[in-house]
Image (cartoon, coloured by chain):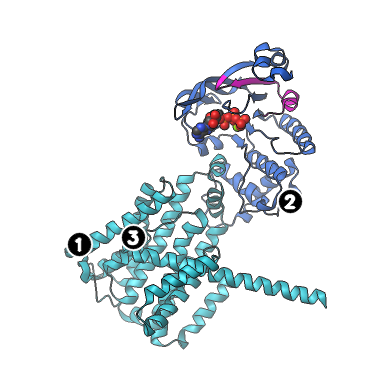
Chain colours: A cyan, B blue
Amino acid sequence: MRLLWLFLALALLGPWFSEYGLKLASEAFILGLYAMAFNLLFRQTGLLSFGQAAFFGLGAYTMALLVARGGWPFPATLPLAFLISALGALFIGFLSIRLSRIYFTMLTLAFAQLLYAVAHKWYAFTGGDNGITDLRPPGIWGESLFYYYVVLFLFALGVLFLWALERSPFGYALRALRDNRARAEAVGINAFGHLLLAFVISGALSGLAGALQGALQRSVFPDYLFWTRSAECILATILGGSGVFLGPAIGATVFLLLRVVVQANTEYWPFFLGALLLLMVLFFPKGLGGLALEMASRRLKGERRGASGS
Amino acid sequence: MALLEAKDIYRSFQGFLALAGVSLSVAEGSFHALVGPNGAGKTTLFNVITGRLRPDRGRITYEGREITGWPTFRIARMGLAISFQRAQPFLSMTVLEAVAVACLGYQGRTFALLKPLRDFKEGLAQAEEALQKVGLEKQSSRRVSELPLGDLKRLDVAIALAGRPKLLLLDEPLAGLSRAERREMVAFIRELLRKEGVTLLFTEHDTEAVLHLADRITVLHQGRVLAEGSPEEIRQNAEVRAAFLGGGA
Ligand SMILES: Nc1ncnc2c1ncn2[C@@H]1O[C@H](COP(=O)(O)OP(=O)(O)OP(=O)(O)O)[C@@H](O)[C@H]1O
Ligand SMILES: [Mg+2]
């Protein structure tokens, strides 16, 4: 299986990275997982959630609060971060999935901003703008190479899960609902139940990504819940191509690399990002992943034609 | 015995009365036609039966159980399947996948998250069987989006049959088909459904086909039942002739 080869290659790459490279690569896996979770909704169900930061942040804060206030060991907080963001998604999804598309998008955004406001104002509990800092995971968990493997392992697990999901009856049912909702319901598919479960899975994986990011940065701030975080997974998805399975992860990697390069040379990162996205949407709507696939298939055809022609 | 019964159904759209007290009883094992001019309310009645629309008043009973207001997916799982007037089954899938996911849908098994669809051998076998019934078995690995209209229509019927329904609703199964395809579809409906004991409620503008297929006809006009009877009775009915056979008959 090609995915397994990819993970193996990434694992072998680990020792060759510098300290900085390990951090950047870990962040790419995290943003990749987050964007792939977003794309489960976007690609398979056609729902555009503009509030994924709610779950990213819930996961991050769950981890941070348990470590800083509860004295939990970092690894033990991950299942809980997963669970709490799943519960958050269950609640928010329950209220927003019944709405028509545009209102769904607006309501997810509203919920995320609400959580942001809470994290921002509730000094006593969340530390407000000061955030929760000094989250260095203990012992080996704080070492970059080991952490790289932790993140890679969870990224791989998440990706394999999404891969299986896409091929399962559940994945097909989501696509049926997206293709023709009335038809899907008329064959016995419970639209609300399926969309809600997809939303919860997406939220839980986003929360896991948030917790991993918090530990990587050793701090969690309210901006984990801010709408720009929600935008990040959308941008990565557009950049990499929502129609390609690994597109969002590719987009996440490119997104981070570009940010490093651009921020080192200019202060116009947002401007640069905006221009790039505009170009992508206008000229390469299938994203970099789609572009790569197209080029590969054209080349394959060219070779075949060449072979039969000679 | 009545398999399906609609009692005094009302439904309006922004003040326009699309159904104004329709009652209908479909006997088990019968082929029941619902006819009437464009806008008579046939599709609206189908939507009320399948739970897509709530009636403003009235009740639907199926197998002796009241199903008014039930969600569509639950009604579908009771063996009440429909093929739509505008057939547009799942365009992103292959033909076999589209029928297989329907199969599992009717059985309430689409919450399986990890096992791939292609390992559901039983569901796939059932899907293949349904495709065979409509004569699409050779197209099973084609993409739905590549099918011509006639095949889409047949695929939609296969999707309806995939759940082995007791009651099948067909909304204009012949619309958009060529003459040859029409003949094929009529023969198919007659033979297959009779053989399997499926009860049929269908709408169709093709009078010849209706008289050929139906053993019971209900005539709908402006949201009301104008007449009901055997094909012979309907043909003789003066009111019906006046209403829309008009000068032609
Ligand atoms: N969702 C809706 N909103 C507003 N009006 C509607 C709606 N659905 C149906 N109608 C109206 O209700 C009436 C009945 O429509 P319906 O589709 O049931 O007719 P029909 O008998 O199926 O006609 P056809 O033979 O053309 O399919 C029509 O006048 C139609 O315009
Ligand atoms: Mg109609």
Residue B35: where, in percent of width, then height?
Answer: 64, 24
Query: Residue placed farthest to the front in the image?
Result: B247
Residues behind callouts 2 and 3 on a single chain? no
Query: Which element is circle 2 on?
Result: helix
- Tell me the tag on residue A10: none
- Tell me the tag on residue A54: 3
Residue B49 appears in view: no
Image marks 2 and 3: residues in contact by CB distance under 8 Å: no
Residue B69: where, in percent of width, then height?
Answer: 46, 31
Residue A294: where, in percent of width, then height?
Answer: 62, 70
- Tell me the tag on residue B139: 2
Q: CA distance from mark 2 to mark 3?
A: 45 Å
Residue A146: where, in percent of width, then height?
Answer: 40, 80
- Tell me the tag on residue A121: 1
Question: Mark 2 falls within which chain?
Answer: B
Q: Does residue A122 appear left or right of residue B8 in this picture?
A: left
Q: Does residue B200 appear left or right of residue A51 in this picture?
A: right
Residue B187 appears in view: yes
Badge 3: few (under 14), some or many (20 or more) residues near its Cα, within 10 Å? many
Type of amino acid at the residue the image marks with label 3 = Ala
Type of amino acid at the residue the image marks with label 2 = Gln
